[in-house]
Each structure stands twice: as structure tokens, then as C-alpha cells.
Image (cartoon, coloured by chain):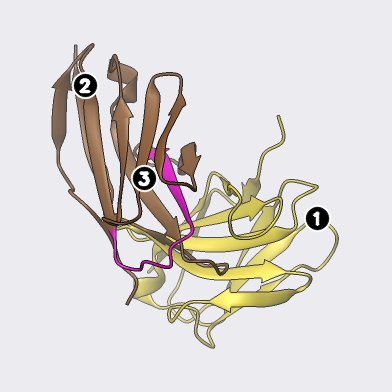
Amino acid sequence: QKEVEQNSGPLSVPEGAIASLNCTYSDRGSQSFFWYRQYSGKSPELIMSIYSNGDKEDGRFTAQLNKASQYVSLLIRDSQPSDSATYLCAVNYGGNQFYFGTGTSLTVIP
Amino acid sequence: EPEVTQTPSHQVTQMGQEVILRCVPISNHLYFYWYRQILGQKVEFLVSFYNNEISEKSEIFDDQFSVERPDGSNFTLKIRSTKLEDSAMYFCASAPTRSQETQYFGPGTRLLVL
């Protein structure tokens, strides 16, 4: 069974702080990893993808991948109230099927 | 910027009725997907489609479901005999190449089965 686990939260951080979101996955054969943001009632919106071990930065967002420990994380620096949303971790195991976690709800407090 | 579109945005149907959900993927994309998200739950993969055939499907995608690309632009999901538990948001997604590429999601169709 291929699982993607996320802490459902809610996670609350003050405006300007760093938000840290974590995701673990069950299959060592996983090949690609994605973070999506989903506002209530809306579709998932891609934030970042990461394929190799290490860090990948894009603006205020940094994705971190550790395949040996089977986790992927997302850091949001200088968090803004507009970052308040549910963050979804998605994993691809090499085929054409993608597995999503349940998401972590983030609230940024002004 | 190109985007995936879906119609209708909302669909209400009676149990046992057939519904067809429509999607127009991004024009130069080759891979197409359907997902569902039951209210308050995670996004679940239903099916992927490439080169006019299903490439993968999940356990959810049983004989009640079918997909089709009837022309060069539309991608449809048909549920033959809807059940109450089919009530969910259905998302279409497309990707330029295969599995390691980013998928772009449409806005979704909210299906309510009464």
C-alpha cells in the first residue's frame, strides 16, 4: 500500500514567521514529489516539485527531500495571511498514478 | 496563460442517473487525469489517460466509470449509474509529458448525488 502521510494540523504561525510542513511516504521507489496549495473549495495549485535529494528554493518557498528517510518538507519563509490554506503533498511512484496526503491546514495570523 | 477548464462547475443528479463531466486540458499536453475529492477528505487518483487509452486506474475506477477523448480537445469522465457516495469534487488535470512532470488542475466539478 502506497501511503502519503501529513500532519493534518491545524498549524498556526504569526505573520512573518517560518511555516514548516512535513510529509512522509511509504515507498522507497518514489520518484517525484510535489507540494500543492488548496484554498477551500478550490482546486490544488502547484507550489513546487522536487525530484532529487536536498533543497530546492523558489522565492519564499523551500522544498526539502530526504529519500533515505522518506520525507519531504516545505518551508514557507516570511509567512503571509494569504498563505493560509491547506497544503497537499503528492508523490509519484514512477507510473502514471499520483498519491496525495490528506493535507495540512495552515493559518497565518496577522 | 493556458489553463485546464471543466464543465459544469456544479452538477446535481438523482441516484442511478448517468453523468458526464467534461474537461478541456491544456492544448499541448499529452497526459490527462481525473481525481476526486470527497468533502473534507484527500484528493484521490481515479485514472490516467495517454495516447487515447487508459494508462493507469485506481481501485475506485470500477465498471461504473469510463473516460473518453471524443475529439482533439475534450476529455470526459462518465459515471453510468451514480451512487450517493459518488458525491464529490471531481478534478481534471493534464501534464505535458509523463509521470515526473507537473500536473495542472482544472477548477473542478462539484457533483451532488441525491
Give me the disc on residue A65.
3
- Answer whether residue B98 is magenta in the image: no
Disc 1, SS:
loop
Instruction: Report crowding for label 2: few under 14, some 14 to 19, many 20 or more residues within 10 A (C-alpha).
Output: many
Label 2 close to label 1 by CB (< 8 Å): no
Q: Residue at x 54, y 77 (%)?
A: B57
Label 1 close to label 3 by CB (< 8 Å): no
Which residue corresponds to mark 1? B73
Q: Residue at x 53, y 84 (%)?
A: B64
**Quarter of the C terminus of chain A within the rendering:** top left
Say which amino acid is labelled 1: Ser
Along the viewing direction, whichever of B18 and A109 lies nearer the viewer = A109
Along the viewing direction, whichever of B88 and B37 lies nearer the viewer = B37
Which residue corresponds to mark 2? A108
- Answer whether residue A27 is magenta in the image: yes
Q: Residue furthest right?
A: B72
Residues at discs 1 and 3 both on one chain? no
Mark-to-mark CA distance, 1 and 3: 36 Å
Say which amino acid is labelled 3: Leu
Q: Which chain is rendered yellow in the image?
A: B
Q: Say which chain tag 1 marks.
A: B
* Whether residue B18 is visible: no
Along the viewing direction, whichever of A106 and A97 lies nearer the viewer = A97
